Amino acid sequence: MEQNRTNVSRDRPAMSWRAKAVVALLVVQLVVTLASILATGAEIGLLQRVQRGEAVTSAEAEASDDRAATVAVVWLVSWLVAGIAWLTWQYRAYHRLRQLGTQGLKFTPGWGVGWWFIPFVNLWKPYQAIKELWVASDPAKGTSDAQGSKEWTTVRWWWGAFLVSGILAWGSLQVMRGTIAELISRDYGLIARDLAWIIAGILAIAVVREIDRRQSLISVGGAPKRPDIPAPPGNIG
């Protein structure tokens, strides 16, 4: 019985506090995004009433605007906090690989984070960095496996949903004012953006948990070491 418990603990090591923080903040982002969908849906209902010629009071219009503005501010704040936590976790995860002796990494901890802030190349470089982090953290594989491996499907779907959300957000911002029909179409685009963001957020949580799990297995010796990783002198947090 004790041996079985030991095996389970090795298969499912506890998450690092950084990974837990990122996951918690991403969950907050998902909740706020759901609130954004509800607020946008309420606004669509109001616009459809206007489109049908029904009476809409100024109080209803102001309440809708205030609700949308409040959700937008909360969303932005939660996005910034979650983003900072993500970048901190990513930097630390790359640094952790170097501490473990991983060879052949194409990205440094600094540039793995820095590519997020460079226009145009941030459409693919961050994805490549996370893909490398995912594969290089696998105790049974080395960085040379990254080109042929198919096991980062989760990372691909995450990045795809992330890009779709960004494209929809950009498209929606092009319609700040217009006819009622155009504003309704814009709001439906915002809902689609939020849905894509929720998918990206759920997959991001899976990415963080899996990378952290793999690195924890290497650190605690719960899985065979790769040839390019010497046994560490002790646990690395």
Image (cartoon, rainbow, N blue to C red):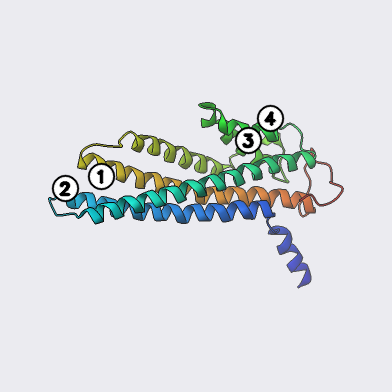
Q: Mark 1 points at which residue?
A: 184
Q: What element carries label 1?
A: helix
Give the distance between the C-alpha atoms of the residues marked 4 and 1, in whole angstroms: 45 Å
Rounded to the nearest angstrom, the CA distance separating label 3 from label 4 is 13 Å
Q: Which residue appears farthest toward the right when viewing the image?
A: 233
Residue 222, percent from left and from top:
77, 55
Return the disc, 3 or 4, that comes first in the chain's sequence: 4
Q: Is residue 140 above or below residue 13?
A: above
Q: Residue at x 56, y 47 (%)?
A: 81
Q: Name the residue under label 4.
A: 106
| Labels 2 and 3 touching (C-beta < 8 A) | no
Residue holding disc 2 = 51
Badge 1 crowding class, 10 Å Cα cut-off, few under 14, some 14 to 19, many 20 or more, is: many
* Marks 2 and 3, the one that precedes in the sequence: 2
Q: In the rendered image of this protein, does residue 230 appear above or below residue 26?
A: above
- The reply to whether residue 196 is visible in this rendering is yes
Nearer to us in this view, 212 or 38: 38
